Image: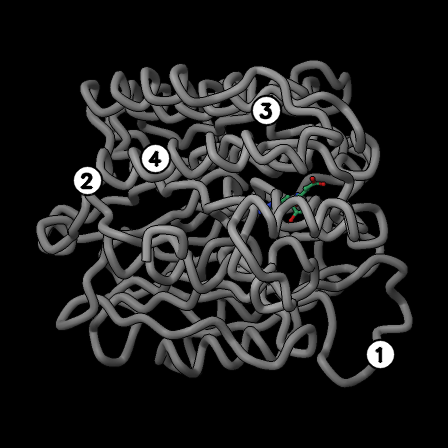
Amino acid sequence: MNWLEVNFDGIVGPTHNYAGLSYGNVASAKNEGLIANPREGVLQGLDKAQHLRSLGMTQGVLPPHDRPHLSTLRSLGFTGSDAEMLTAAWTGSPALVRNLMSSATMWTANASTVSPSPDTKDGRMHFTPANLAAMYHRSIEHETTGRVLKAIFPEGDRFAHHPGLPGGTHMGDEGAANHNRFCSGYGDTGVALYVYGRSAFDGAKDLTYPGRQTLEASEAIARQHGTPGDKTVFIRQNPEAINAGAFHNDVVAVSNKNVFFYHEKAFEDPSAMQNMLRAAAPDIDYQFVEVPEGAVPLCDAVSSYLFNSQLISPPDDDRMRLILPIEVAETPSTKAYIDGLLASNGPIGAADFLDVRQSMRNGGGPACLRLRVVTSEADRTAMGANCLLNDDLVATLRDWASRHYRDRVRPEDLGDVALMEECFAALDELTQILKLGSVYDFQK
Ligand code: SUG
């Protein structure tokens, strides 16, 4: 069946900027107001994808979304031409426009939760786009994300799609960033671990920053994806980690197959987490790589994004490999930890440090930038669109970006009608390159 993990990286959008929109995300707050370079951002992302391809990994892309999100403006009572609406909104509420110009769709770990076919009762792969209800600028993503995913994974015998959960922040769902899948081999039955920040109805008094994912949202997704109850585990994030800036669990934990690499303070009860995973699948030879606070303080884990790395199994490597942000090499505690980890005889045998600084400054590391989709060969054959990278497609995308993207976007540029027009022209062409059909509101 040739099972593979395919990573779908989010293409950085033409309006990428630093608007300080994400309360509880330390990097987003710290870098508010910086001048962004969308062209550099998109190229850094493509370089990362090419690096994974050079390691023998299969790599896809997901497109950025149309910004400003005009259908939100319309639903809020703005009328007239696109330019008139943007100008009126910018005059009346620059903060609203900043939210509707965000390029946050680049972080595709938040695009959806994906349950691959070996794990579901009906044997189909299930998708639920994350409602991202906790942050206004992200709550506008899920409908377009759903259309894109349906274009790539046509609804039918193999792929099942659910709408984003209703219920606002009570049912706040952040997608794959708070979901891990454990298995022996990708095609074997897996265990789903859902990590939540709070319960929908209890107030979460121990949190100073938002606990974006709720237990009830995780339970709803598991129900609709049809993963068996005895193979589905729910565990709470450590409130201390959220309050230190781990707004998603993937800031403090990453898994691949049987290996779980996480910070000692990632979970409220790490030994319960281990016990529940073992009980759910006694046949999996779990390797828990728990990093102690004494070696890497939580604040270093959050600022360097040590755990927001990709943990992968390249076909030619005998041990797993970490794809880390360059900031990990620049932080003494995390650099020393990685040196020690590679020298040990553990499950992780190699590490690469990549520059994704345009994304990192908004709190998005290598792991945020990708959505993992475990596929059989038949799944890949059934896929639509043209989103799997090869050298020609990468060259086309680089050329496309260099023609359409600015190298400077300041917060005060976000009301610029020309930037909107450039964004729509770029995305219209991109949907043709990626053979996605009409997925954006401005194309309807
Ligand atoms: O949701 N940042 C994103 C970062 C998402 C990272 N994803 C994962 N950890 N999987 C967020 O907080 C900042 C946008 C701004 O401030 O302009 C932002 O949305």
* Residue hosting label 4: 313
Q: Is residue 376 above or below residue 273?
A: above
Q: Is residue 240 above or below residue 298?
A: below
List x then y, in percent, for residue 339.
Answer: 61, 17
Badge 2 crowding class, 10 Å Cα cut-off, few under 14, some 14 to 19, many 20 or more, is: some
Camera-nearest residue between 417 and 33: 417
Q: What kind of element bears circle 2?
A: loop
Which residue is label 2 attached to?
386
Quickly name the residue at label 1: 203
Asked if the residue under mark 1 is in contact with the one under mark 3, i.e. CB atoms within 8 Å, the reply is no
The answer to whether 37 is drawn above or below residue 166 in the figure is: above
* Horizontal and vertical percent position of residue 346: 50, 32
Residues under labels 3 and 1: Cα distance? 35 Å
Q: Which residue is mark 3?
A: 325
Local packing at callout 3 (Cα closer than 10 Å; few below 14, some 14-19, many 20+) is many
Residue at the (76%, 24%) spot, across then down: 34
Determine the quadrant in which ligand 1 lies.
Answer: top right
SS label for mark 3? strand
Q: How many marks?
A: 4
- Earlier residue among tags 4 and 1: 1
